[in-house]
Amino acid sequence: MNLTEITVSRTIPASAERVFDVWMNPKSPGGPWFGAERLIWSGEVDGLFYLAGKHEGRTWPHYGRFIAIERPRRVEHTWVSEATKGVESIVTVTMEPRAEETEVTLTHTGVPDDEMGRRHKEGWAWILSMLAEGLAARKSASSSD
């Protein structure tokens, strides 16, 4: 099986600490774990997760374990799903401060180089968009208080 690497980036209007905290809090709107149909989550190194997400009318299970958690700069975890054909792939998320914003880069390595594998790119881009929107909404809500 041929494997590929997917990278998506997004500038988020929040500090790296804030982005990291939302990313690592499954109860935080805008974070990748929020709103799952079912979630089992242990956000620590060697902690496991199970995420069942609804997409295109069906539920897609995802599994993994956290490899590295370095607040506020990096989160790395494995990712196993039907779209990875059961192969353990690696997701690395880095948060680089840029003045009042944070450049978030997500790299997913070991993804099958086929249509389902490559569709991870649009999924991860959507996740980063939800993160940006969630943090922008919080920023505007707190600035209007």
Image (cartoon, rainbow, N blue to C red):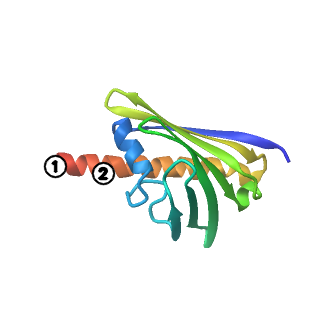
Residue occupying the point 58% across, 63% down: 50
| Residue 26 % position (x, y) | 43, 59
Q: Nearer the viewer, residue 14 or 56?
A: 14
| Amino acid type indicated by mark 1 | Ser
Q: In the displayed structure, does residue 138 sit left or right of residue 131?
A: left
Element at label 2: helix
Residue occupying the point 70% across, 39% down: 5
Q: Quadrant of residue 20?
A: top left
| Residue 70 % position (x, y) | 47, 38
Residue occupying the point 61% across, 73% down: 57
Is 62 placed above or below 142 here?
Answer: below
* Disc on res. 144: 1
Is 123 placed above or below 104 here?
Answer: below
Is residue 13 at all visible to an observer of this figure? no
| Residue 131 % position (x, y) | 43, 49
Is 143 placed above or below 95 here?
Answer: below
Pointer 2 local density, CA inside 10 Å: few below 14, some 14–19, many at least 20: some
Residue occupying the point 39% across, 50% down: 22
